[in-house]
Amino acid sequence: MARVRDVRITRCGRPARLVGGLAVLAISGIAQISSASPAGPDAPVNALIVAQGGAAPAADVSEEISGGNGAFVGESNPSDLEQEGYVQEEFVASGTATDYRAVGDLGADGRWTFEPDSQAPYRTRILVRRPKDVSMFSGAVVVEWNNVSGGVDANPDYASLAEEITRRGHIWVGVTTQLIGVEGGPVLVHAPGAEAVAGKGLKGIDPARYGTLSHPGDGYSFDIFTQIARAIRRGAPAFGGVRARRVLALGESQSAIALTTYYNGIQPRTRAFDGFFVHSRAYVSLPLVPPGKFADLAGSIGSQSAAIIRTDLDVPVLELQTEADVTGVLKSVEVRQRDSSHFRLWEVAGTAHADAHLLGPIADNIDCGTPINNGAMHVVAKAGLRHLDTWVLTGKHPPRHDAFR
């Protein structure tokens, strides 16, 4: 089960104020590891994922992580996994990743062309939550690009979607995708009470557990995310040995901004994911950066041009935006686009980028001089995930906003 430290977050509003330029959950917690699951047969390689005459590289996820203080993840309101019939395990994800360079301009239509550039070894981690009884598995694996805006590796989408994930029997995989999550670095959103862990990275927080991890820089994050998706498709004991029938990418705030870059420039090359849940993106995308560097998202806001989600791919995208996202610092209104056969935009009035549900029990200890937003954004998010999964599985489109027809 999860133990949550008392961390106060300055995140308020109706909708919420955006703190430090970008309001993202930044809460520290510790989750204990359950026993290893039985292995099963490997799934075949996705036929679409082929490179240079052979199977494209996938992450090695065979090494379970143990020791130290137990699995760490920034999580404000952890669910009772045992009660839900779930187990949690943590694994190293390792391999050699490629970074990318843009060919031509990154146009406003999102139809970007990326080419592979350099390669570097990586050794990061994944956190897996799956049904203990493999017969309850839905066939869907939801893969969250963990968020590092608060200087810790956090899972805000799981916080919003946990009830839907567990009641449907999905497997959730949280990926420590970015440099700061492993190695530490600048903190974009400061959370009073989290000073002891913010900016340290997993290696600094618990060197006994995570000291062997290594990240080559955010430019490689996109291929790391791809290689973990491939490992999921091929099947492994890390995922209970089950066969994934659909793999969905999730990301909130900075992670949604990263998924914008991924969808527009990487997904056309890799076809690694069957659907995308883009939650609270900004008008900008996560920039490509040189080896060893972190993506300067704060620098991108205000200097980078706007770009929509490209419309020429056949992979469904459900974009979910709070009211605070639309006209606040993130200015998603600048990339508002019409619904299409493979795109849905949901904007939810009266909701905040980070709200009482996302903050969990510590919200009662936060005094911002105004009530913390308690709009039911998490309920809409759960509905969005259900509709996205149905869309991928059956082709049935989610409801439209009348304004975006």
Image (spheres, rainbow, N blue to C red):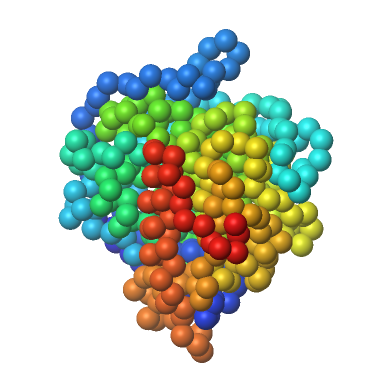
Which one is nearer the viewer's eye here, 105 or 189?
A: 105
Q: Residue at x 56, y 44 (%)?
A: 341
| Quadrant of the frame with the N terminus | bottom left
Residue 22 visible somewhere in the drawing: no
- Residue 354 location, x and y as percent? 49, 69
Where 89 falls versus 83 (above or below)? Answer: above
Please report the residue visible at 19 percent of the width from the left and 48 percent of the height from the top.
Answer: 85
Q: Which residue is rendered at x = 51% and y = 89% of the image? A: 369
Judge by depth and name the residue closer to the eye, 115 or 180.
115
Within the image, what quadrant is residue 16 found in? bottom right
Q: Farthest residue toward the bottom?
A: 369
In the rendered structure, the answer to whether residue 174 lies left or right of residue 343 reads left
Left/right placement of residue 401 relative to residue 385 reads right
Q: Position of residue 280 (x, y in %)?
A: 55, 60
Query: Which quarter of the image is occupied by the C terminus?
Result: bottom right
Residue 162, position as x, y percentages in the image:
33, 56
